[in-house]
Image: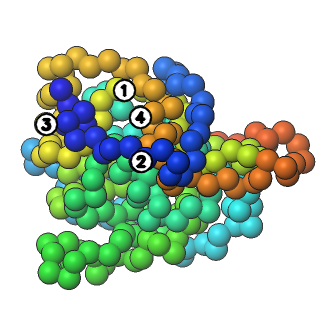
Amino acid sequence: MSNWRKMKRPRRAAGQGLRLVAGQGTGESPRSGSLRAVGSRSVADGGRLARRELPARVERRELPATPETAAGSIHVLIVSLHGAGPPPWRRLELPSAMTLDRLHEVLQWTFGWSDFGPHSFVTLYGEFGGPVRPASRAAKRAAERRDESGVALAQAAGGEGDGIAYLYGYHDEWRVDILVEQILRATPGTAYPRCSGGQGEDIPGEGYEGVWEFNAEREELALDVYFHPEDLTEDLADLATVIIPAAERVSGPAAECVSGPAAEGVGGPLDRA
């Protein structure tokens, strides 16, 4: 039995937040896992991510302004647990204007974590994170990061095929690879974030020393790969908001893209020189 099942967060009381209906799950493999480690590997030293490797090939660029289209669009993300074999993945639909601190909350729920350790987002525009206690082990490292609360998802990953790495834990025990699969107009009357697909029943939760220990337990238990996206959508209900009211109509189909076609086989910020 996984830690997630032992330590899964309690769901909110009825009436708090929106109750949503998610899309159906799919076993189809997404275009995910393209964020590769700097150098030859990302899981080292007993399965812990060697953070010193991450910034080596990330050329920091100037953070762009939030595009005007972000107010009415959504990012469809494929998020997968780096180093897990096979990696559990989820297809998430989130407001393009969502800030990284809110994305952090979504990822914590998605992978069953409880925000016990520090975190950061590694992007082409530098590293972003949240506040930490001044006397904590993460204080010195946090001084090197910029505030995540003022950065929108559309700024950090503004195009289809763009990628971000999310690191969690005092020693970066966990890494989530985030790939922008599509950027679409929001559907009128639909609340976001929500989950529309995924695979892999088990997620880590707290208690493991890293992905290597998580992998060992998964191999022993031979867990089911099926996943119910509506359960995660329900868990994310308190974070959900309707971007376009149901009474409004947008020109063209709701699924019309607001950016160019997705690039095939692209990598993320850790792949680019």
Where residue 252 appears, as percent x and y from the top left, is 88, 43
Q: Which residue is mark 3?
A: 213
* Quadrant, the C terminus: bottom left
Tag 1 and tag 4, C-beta contact below 8 Å: yes
Identify the mark nearer the N-term, 1 or 4: 4
Q: Earlier in the sequence, mark 3 or mark 4?
A: 4
- In three-dimensional space, the C-alpha distance between marks 1 and 2, rounded to whole angstroms, equals 24 Å
Picture disc at residue 12? 2
* Marks 2 & 4, CB-CB < 8 Å contact: no
Separation of marks 2 and 3 at Cα, in angstroms: 30 Å
- Which residue lies under the disc numbered 1? 200
Please report the residue visible at 65 percent of the width from the left and 69 percent of the height from the top. Answer: 66
Q: Residues within 10 Å of mark 4 (few under 14, many from 20)?
A: many
- Tag 1: amino acid: Gly
Residue count near mark 2 (Cα–Cα under 10 Å), binned few <14, some 14–19, many ≥20: few
Mark 3 and mark 4: Cα distance apart in space = 18 Å
Q: CA distance from mark 1 to mark 4?
A: 7 Å
**92 to the left or right of 190:** left
In which image quadrant can residue 122 be found? bottom left
Q: Nearer the viewer, residue 123 or 191?
A: 191
Report which quarter residue 231 is drawn in.
top left
User: Which mark is on residue 89?
Assistant: 4
